[in-house]
Amino acid sequence: MSRKLTKLLIVVALLLSFLLLNTNAHACCVGDRGNVDSLSDVNVSDLTYLVEYLFKGGPPPACQDEADVNADSALNVDDLTYLVSYLFKGGTAPEPCQPNTNPDVLINLNVGTWFVTDVTEYNTSGGIDSSYQTLSTVISDTLIADSLWMVVEDTTSIDHTYTVNRVDGVWYWSDTLTPPEALALKYPATVGDSYPYYDATVYVVSIDEQITVPAGTFSCYYYRVDVPVVGTLAKIWCAPNIGIVKAEEYGLNLIWPYLKTKIELANYQLVP
């Protein structure tokens, strides 16, 4: 197997790990507009953060409501101009934004939430190699690159997973990939949307597909993960405000893809 294909399969495994993930704990909006870095009062560090994001490829603000300085529902140079005027020219202070402690998100969970998932692994002939359950718990949050990320502990792995919900969907953090953070699951989305995830492309196939798993029946967004030449490497079904309820990973049997791993939600508890 080529190094490039190995990397792509690792990326798919990372996508599948979103079954274990959680939303960010930074409820938008919790302060004033202009607090771009979500650290303290509005000051020059917020201006620096916004410049880095808009022009130098810096990380997106953790709470885009607070970064939307001029309250026009967009992040662009107009917000930068407004902030400069307020900080240095006596301009009008940004207007307050209203707290939203229970936003409509793709994966809407808090510390203490847990998932039990059924995992089935298949061989190249379609037979079952193994089946087991895994328990995943959201244990804490942590600050990475000035953004708050949720930490998920999985009983089948010694590693922790880091993720966050932003206004455009679920983002994933990995210090072994470049760039270290990337949009994994776009939300909200429209059927036909597509976007890059490292070397793969994610397609939004449906936004209302009914999926039945041991935990129940859910109305899901359906995402398909494709790579050039190889084809489909993963399928993911995610119920808004709950999380991923089903995922499939595909491997290669010589040149033909086969179902390698299936994950289904068996039980869960959401902490308000």
Image: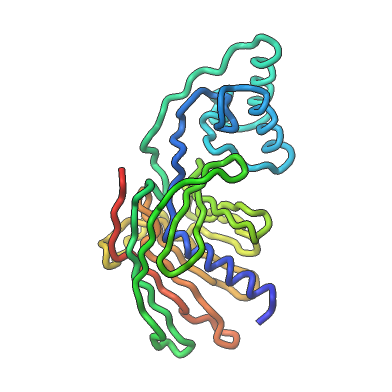
Q: Quadrant of the C terminus?
A: top left
Which residue lies at the image location 54% right of the left edge and 71% below the top edge?
232
Which residue lies at the image location 55% right of the left edge and 86% below the top edge?
253
- Could you say which is closer to the camera, residue 29 or residue 259? 29
Which residue lies at the image location 48% right of the left edge and 65% below the top edge?
16
Q: Position of residue 140 (x, y in %)?
A: 44, 48
Q: Residue furthest right?
A: 56
When the figure is inspected, residue 35 is found, relative to residue 134, above or below; the finding is above
Q: Position of residue 69 (x, y in %)?
A: 58, 24
Q: Quadrant of the N terminus?
A: bottom right
Would residue 168 be visible to someone looking at this image? Answer: no
Q: Residue 213: which quarter of the image?
A: bottom left
Query: Looking at the image, how many numbered discs can be counted on the residues?
Result: 0
When the figure is inspected, residue 158 is found, relative to residue 40, above or below; the finding is below
Q: Position of residue 78 (x, y in %)?
A: 66, 25
Q: Residue furthest front?
A: 158
Would residue 243 be visible to someone looking at this image? Answer: yes
Q: Position of residue 254 (x, y in %)?
A: 59, 88
Q: Residue furthest top?
A: 90
Q: Is residue 252 left or right of residue 102?
A: right
Q: What colouring method underlies this structural image?
A: rainbow
